[in-house]
């Protein structure tokens, strides 16, 4: 355990020292993964489906604010859909605009959630995001989580129904609009996932703020249980064919990731908890103090074994 704590301290020290270099690298990697995901799913416009262009745009994102990654991801998505179908581009573009208005209004600091959720869906571990945001975010983070879910399912729906949309004649513009809008709005699986993830964020947030021992661990376990229960209940009610094994496995991975997050963000020693009481002229104060687990980096000691010998030789020479 001591080795892990020392490693944590070293990593935190390195990040604080080289943050100006590490942050752009992480933003570059996030933008690169997001754009490659979009190109792989709906790469209909050949002019932007090129690795060179993706690298250039990702490099631009590394030096811009985090919101710029969302803007570029949305732009790539709309352009690809425009090359495939104007109706798809219009509907998805309007959806992105609506999400941006909600996102910027309620939780502008959770940009990374909107970008990471579609990628986590692709990796089949989207349950990591709501659990993590419940631990380090606020209830408003549920809005960002919902926006990320909607963004994924819009892209997923179009990719799944390419042949159906392409088979509709150009004269059936109204039918295309109706088919796309109905498919997105009436997507029961998307609605169940949004409800499950939002409930997970709120439950985890409320429990981890309680003044009880092991509040974060209790919140993580409760979040996993709530997520699984809501998804399974939604599956039974709407028959959306959510795989039980995938849900359980994904939540186990999410719990393990949350343990790592807890180690770096909220690592405390409940065995040394102290309850303090004091007062002033107007109030009595009852304070529960839980110390953090901190281990200082061990200092290397250099022992000079030749110094005494060198002084002895020097004295001997001086006597001669």
Image (spheres, rainbow, N blue to C red):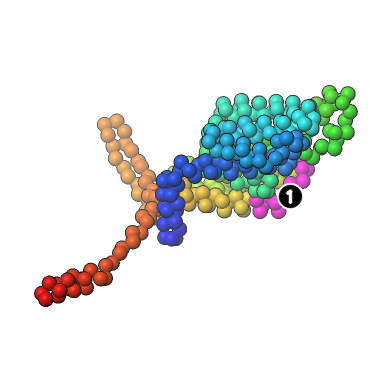
The overriding secondary structure of the stretch rendered in magenta is helix
Q: Between residue 140 and residue 39, name the one nearer to us.
A: 39
Identify the element where label 1 is drawn: loop
Badge 1 crowding class, 10 Å Cα cut-off, few under 14, some 14 to 19, many 20 or more, is few
Tell me which residue sits at (59%, 29%) in the image: 103
Q: Between residue 209 and residue 170, name the one nearer to us.
A: 170
Provide residue 121's location: percent of width, then percent of height: 67, 44
Residue occupied by mark 1: 243
Provide residue 148's location: percent of width, then percent of height: 64, 37
Left or right of 11? Residue 70 is: right
Check residue 242 for magenta coloring: yes
Q: Which residues are magenta?
A: 236-250
Residue 178 vertical placement versus 194 (above, below): above
User: Which quadrant would residue 68 be assigned to in this image?
Assistant: top right
Provide residue 207's location: percent of width, then percent of height: 52, 43
Tell me which residue sits at (48%, 52%) in the image: 263
Check residue 118 for magenta coloring: no
Q: Between residue 242 and residue 300, name the one nearer to us.
A: 300
Left or right of 79? Residue 104 is: left
Residue 172 vertical placement versus 258 (above, below): above
Please tell me how many numbered marks the rendered image carries. Answer: 1
Tell me which residue sits at (72%, 31%) in the image: 79
């Amino acid at each position: 355990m001591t080795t892990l704590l020392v490693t944590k301290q070293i990593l935190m020290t390195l990040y604080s020292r080289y943050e100006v270099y590490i942050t752009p690298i992480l933003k570059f990697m996030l933008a690169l993964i997001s754009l490659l995901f979009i190109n792989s799913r709906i790469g209909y416009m050949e002019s932007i489906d090129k690795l060179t262009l993706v690298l250039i745009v990702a490099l631009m994102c590394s030096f811009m604010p985090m919101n710029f990654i969302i803007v570029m991801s949305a732009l790539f998505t709309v352009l690809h859909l425009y090359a495939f179908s104007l109706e798809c581009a219009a509907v998805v573009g309007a959806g992105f605009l609506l999400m941006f208005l909600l996102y910027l209004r309620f939780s502008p600091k959770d940009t990374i959630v909107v970008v990471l959720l579609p990628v986590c869906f692709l990796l089949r571990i989207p349950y990591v995001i709501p659990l993590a945001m419940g631990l380090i975010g606020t209830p408003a983070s549920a809005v960002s989580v919902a926006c990320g879910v909607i963004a994924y399912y819009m892209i997923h729906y179009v990719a799944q129904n390419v042949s159906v949309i392409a088979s509709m004649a150009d004269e059936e513009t109204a039918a295309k609009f109706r088919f796309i809008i109905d498919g997105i709005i009436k997507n029961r699986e998307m609605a169940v996932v949004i409800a499950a993830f939002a409930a997970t964020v709120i439950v985890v947030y409320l429990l981890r703020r309680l003044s009880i021992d092991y509040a974060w661990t209790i919140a993580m376990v409760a979040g996993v249980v709530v997520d699984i229960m809501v998804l399974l209940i939604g599956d039974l009610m709407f028959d959306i064919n959510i795989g039980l094994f995938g849900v359980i496995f994904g939540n186990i991975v999410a719990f393990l990731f949350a343990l790592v997050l807890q180690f770096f963000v909220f690592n405390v020693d409940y065995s040394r908890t102290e309850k303090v009481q004091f007062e002033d002229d107007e109030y009595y104060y009852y304070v529960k103090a839980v110390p953090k687990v901190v281990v200082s980096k061990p200092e290397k000691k250099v022992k000079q074994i030749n110094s005494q010998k060198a002084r002895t030789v020097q004295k001997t020479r001086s006597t001669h």
